[in-house]
Amino acid sequence: MAVTIKSEREIELMRESCRLLAIVHKEMEEKIRPGMSTQDIDTLGDNLIRKLGCVPNCKNYNGYPASICVSVNDEVVHGIPTKKRILQEGDIVSLDAGLIYKGYHSDAARTHGVGQISPEAQKLIDVTRESFFAGIKMAKAGNRLYDISNAIDAYVKPYGFGIVRDLVGHGIGTHLHEDPQIPNFAQKRRGIRLQAGMTLAVEPMINLGRPDVEWLNDNWTVVTEDGSLSAHYENTILITDGEPEILTLY
Ligand code: MF3
Ligand code: CO
């Protein structure tokens, strides 16, 4: 799927898709508490998305069975919600969600603490979010794609956390996953030149321990190989000639 430059009309549709997704994330965040199942979160998110007149873009994506990807503790991404997995005080939970509004996709992820969490878990969540903002400082027309990747890597490096290498960010528009792929670690090459009108999902996934991940037998859930905690932070952004617009912020 090629790199696309969105027209002014398409950008308006992307903005609205992303604005609605921000509402969904906000409402899910407010409801998270110990004792909830991961399926409760999926039900909540699915209902909200449909109430807004949209369609969840995860549901049935390559056979993925739910509307919200819910990943707990050492689960990096694409955890499958179930009524058996109950959130406990001290857990961290990553919610990755997207929706389709008038044919246009949005995509965003957040990691939340459940009740009181450890200082190291909070640090991981904070550094992951901050690395996104460090990365997108470079996200403007005329810069190169991997300026974003290099900036995320440089931001995370001093903390000694593991940057996941097997999963990447992506272009987004009339398809959930469009070119280009956006790595979150330093690259030797410079990548494509960024142009105004590109919409990109930038999504660092950071582990407290080693960067290595593996896939569970459900063929979806990605976990850290060393069992360490993992955090995820993603927004859909619009490239402009100046600062990027972050479309999925509430
Ligand atoms: N939202 C995810 C992303 O960031 C994709 C989820 S695909 C699913 O690209 F099938 F796992 F839902
Ligand atoms: Co994404």
Image: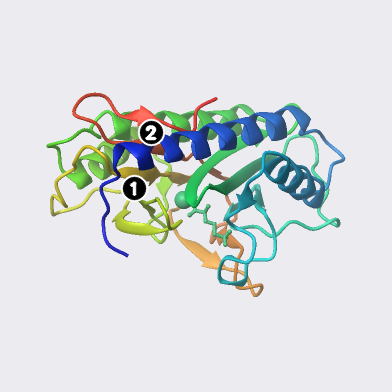
Image coords of residue 232 (percent x, y): 51, 43
Residue 240 visible in the current orientation: yes
SS at mark 2? Answer: helix
Residue 205 disc label: none
Which residue lies at the image location 66% right of the left edge and 72% below the top edge? 218
Local crowd size for mark 2, using a 10 Å CA cut-off: few (<14), some (14–19), many (≥20): many
Which residue lies at the image location 21% right of the left edge and 46% below the top edge? 145
Which quarter of the image is occupied by the C terminus? top right
SS at mark 1? Answer: loop
Image coords of residue 103 (percent x, y): 49, 52
Tag 2 near tag 1, CB within 8 Å: yes
Q: Residue placed farthest to the front in the image?
A: 9
Q: Nearer the viewer, residue 231 or 47?
A: 47
Q: Nearer the viewer, residue 241 or 117?
A: 241
- The quadrant in which residue 244 appears is top left
- Residue, disc 1: 184
Image coords of residue 88 (percent x, y): 80, 40
Q: How far apart in space, not on screen, are marks 2 and 1 (Cα)?
A: 9 Å
Residue 179, compared with residue 236, is above or below; it is: below
Local crowd size for mark 1, using a 10 Å CA cut-off: few (<14), some (14–19), many (≥20): many
Question: Which kind of residue does numbered mark 2 sit on?
Answer: Ser
- Give the side of residue 36 with respect to residue 155, left or right: right
- The quadrant in which residue 125 appears is top right
- Residue, disc 2: 131
Residue 57, compared with residue 195, is above or below; it is: below
Residue 48, compared with residue 213, is above or below; it is: above
